[in-house]
Image: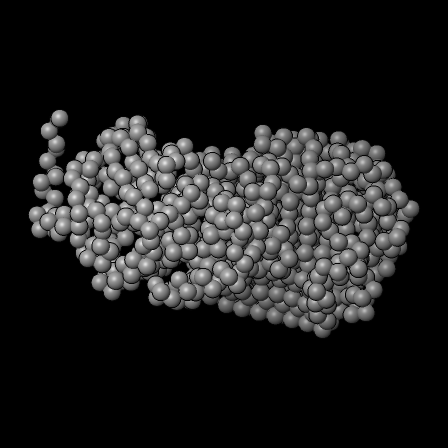
Amino acid sequence: MLEVKNLSVSINGRKILDDLDLTVRDGEVAALMGPNGSGKSTLSHVIAGRKDYMVESGDILLNGESLLDLEPDVRAAKGLFLAFQYPIEIPGVATLTFLKATVNAQCKRRGQEELSTPDFMKRVKAAANKLKISQEMLKRALNVGFSGGEKKRMDILQMALLEPSFAILDETDSGLDIDALRVVAGGVNALRAPGRGFLVITHYQRLLDYVVPDTVHVMAHGRIMRSGGKELAVELEKSGYRDYNAVPAVA
Amino acid sequence: MAAVQETVDRVKAIDVSEYKYGYCFDIESDKAPKGLNEETVRFISAKKNEPAWLTEWRLGAYRRWLTMTEPRWARVEYPKIDFQDIYYYSAPKTAAGPKSLEDVDPELLKVYAKLGIPLREQEALAGISPDRRIAVDAVFDSVSVVTTFKEELAKAGVIFCPISEAVHSHPELVQKYLGSVVPTTDNYYATLNSAVFSDGSFVYVPPGVRCPMELSTYFRINEQNTGQFERTLIIADKGSYVSYLEGCTAPKRDENQLHAAVVELIAHDDAEIKYSTVQNWYPGDADGRGGIYNFVTKRGDCRGANSKISWTQVETGSAITWKYPSCILRGDNSRGEFYSIAISNGRQQVDSGTKMIHLGKNTTSRVISKGISAGRSQNTYRGQISAHRKATGARNFTNCDSLLIGNSCGAHTVPYIESKNPSAQFEHEATTSKISEDQLFFCMQRGLSAEEATALIVNGFVRDVLQQLPMEFAVEAQKLIAISLEGSVG
């Protein structure tokens, strides 16, 4: 379970998140929608532990434990995963090498035994097949020269291998054509499980046709403005965000 | 893949700023009096029982040296060296000239065991499959202490022995080739080396012979206030092939120590020499105290047609590195290669690169240089590519990449390109990049610590060069890269 409590965050003195509250339960898929600049990506980065931001107040709890003082790699080992809006290229590092290093690093940090190479390869092959990722692609340097769709599928592959207890997908649908969107959504749906929560950040209803959310939250001006069921996303698709763009009246 | 994992493990296992080879051993030694004069030169020559021509050769170099001044064009800074405050000769005190391992001082064997260098042939055989054997020449301070697999190499006709021994056993070869690539007049440190060199390795591979195993020399400076001046001479006769590896370590000391080596390679028609170095001399502490001054002249002469010389180096140690392994492409269709990884951290200063001198027709060369700077270090690539007016069809490709870690280090690239032949084609590519916050954050989000992430990204950056190293050295180099970058992030 992810709990964001009264979280206020600024960067260079500018407030981005303003007393934000959000709870996503185990097994729940929550969609986070909102106009550009509403603070959605900032929220995902702050949860994952990026250092550029100043947390002024509030707390972030994963399964009841505060994440704020932990390094990003420790948060990852506690079960947090972030699929990036723009997955990063690592030149010269073969994708397989990277996957194995990360899986083993997390195993070790959790005090679990590392996977043997044959076991690891079996798992990678099975997961890669589901996402239509070729063996050849696994040998290439991570994300270097990959298309937008390939990068997103690669991120979902990492999620599948790392088996997080909570995953944030930051605009995973951006830059995807409809076929790629189906593959990625299929990958996400396959990972839905009672013990695993998702926060799906998106601008559009489109992704939510394939990954059907349990709850939908609308964010603007650094806070959650409205929450509801999946019908809220449909409504937003019709009316747009104009109702949320106005600066809120001081309460 | 396993090797990368190992790198990652090593980063975690080893304490930051711990120089692994920093211990010093108590071994009785036989030294020349401190300081440098004609007597010192004669003392060294007499210790080695050298023929008159060599004594004169040394003295000629010494007299020349007196007229020279230290080069100051490199981008390195250090206080003036007092050449009278150095011991120029130090030898472990054992019965002169060990004949076999049984004659070697057990203390010495312990040193090499601790350094992880297999000197006993049966030990070397035990861990390594028969087709990956390595013959080792171990040089301790000023003398070679043991050479392994000598007999087996002799069967193939390959001569691999200390140069001090070759002077006596193969005088005609030594006299013919010594100084023929790096003349005694070449430069300040090479000239000094010519005067006082004490030992090093000698290799001769006869025509048509493919050397049956990798040859390797491990250099170790142990004594205090002692300079190490080794001299290596490798000759590959027509149609032969040899691969040679060199490794170096030194104890931690507060004062700077001078290491001024000369390496000469000669490749005749259709011959190939592959020379690999993993240099890990003590780099000094975090404040820049101590460390080795590594002022080395390495040059290969592609004397014959279709010959090839390839330098591969992984430079992680030394307080100051001043080193430009070069190729003279004299024979038609000859080829020179230079693959380099130079890593600097702390207060280290590196000024390194290569020269490719195209003299013959259709000569080709390739330069791949990867410089990595961290801490407060300065890392300079300095390279010269030139085509003589007769070098029709000469081609060079140079790729020079620099990676910066942190905000207090520097990377510099100084290429010199000269062509006197209109048909020459020279290409130069260069990039400078920084490990980005995005890359680090991405890797950490996936579970790698900051240091593991840095090691992984750096290993990716240097991959083209690591692939050129013999397998065992590639693994060693990868570990070394991780260790030398410790404490560079966070």
Q: Can residue A139 be seen in this view?
A: no
The spot of residue B258 in percent (x, y) is: 70, 38
Image coordinates for residue B359, horizontal then vertical, percent:
58, 62
Counting from the top left corner in percent of width and height, residue B394 is at: 51, 65
Q: Which of A143 and B463 is in front in this view?
A: A143
- Examine the rendering and report whether any part of residue B33 can be seen: yes
Give the side of residue B448 with respect to residue B103, left or right: left
| Rendered view: B286 above or below B98 | above
Between B128 and B262, the residue placed more toward the observer is B128
Q: In this view, does B201 lie above or below B378?
A: below
Query: Residue reaching furthest front?
Result: A194
Q: Which residue lies at the image location 83% right of the left edge and 43% below the top edge?
A: B107
Quadrant in the rendering for residue B319? top right
Furthest residue to the bottom?
B208
- Residue at image position (79%, 59%) is B121
Q: Nearer the viewer, residue A205 or A232?
A: A232
Residue in the image at 76% along x and 34% along y: B224
A149 over A65 or under it: above or below? below
* Residue B329 picture quarter: bottom right
Q: x and y percent of residue A28 in the render? A: 28, 48
Number of marks present in the image shown: 0
